[in-house]
Image (spheres, rainbow, N blue to C red):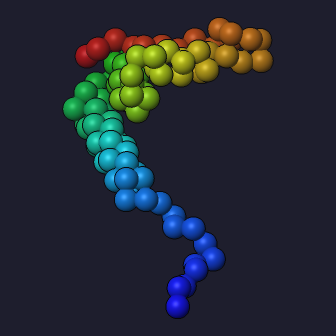
Amino acid sequence: MTFNHPYPPLATREELADRIVAALDIAGAVSSTLRLPSEAGLYDDAHHKMWVIDQMVRVLVGNDEAYEKWIESFEYGEDGPHTYKWDKGIAP
């Protein structure tokens, strides 16, 4: 007798492996991002803190193209592009 499960399998082994790798990449990015404020965020000046935030964004988005798109999205507002200005800060 063959049992036909009413639901398809959630994922193949390959899909699960890809999801695990993606999760590890995310965990690595989060870990790298959380190290930045403890290593470079100890300076009092706002422009240094802004640099740390900018570096955190760069790590989280993953690459230069995604970073530029994120900046465009950040700067877009009710008055169109460049409504807001992203400050990259100054490295400590």
Q: Residue at x 39, y 28 (%)?
A: 62
Outermost bottom residue: 1
Viewer-closest of 54 and 90: 54
Q: Is residue 88 above or below residue 15?
A: above
Q: Residue at x 51, y 64 (%)?
A: 10
Tell me the quadrant of the picture where the C terminus can be found.
top left
Viewer-closest of 36 and 17: 17
Q: Residue at x 51, y 67 (%)?
A: 9
Report the side of 43 relative to 84 (left or right): left
Residue 80 image point, x, y percent: 74, 11
Residue 54 image point, x, y percent: 41, 22
Q: Is residue 50 above or below residue 23?
A: above
Residue 29 image point, x, y percent: 33, 38
Q: Residue at x 37, y 48 (%)?
A: 18
Viewer-closest of 79 and 15: 15
Outermost left residue: 39
Report the side of 52 relative to 79 (left or right): left
Residue 42 image point, x, y percent: 27, 30
Outermost top residue: 82
Viewer-closest of 21 and 63: 21
The answer to whether residue 46 of the structure is visible from this angle is no
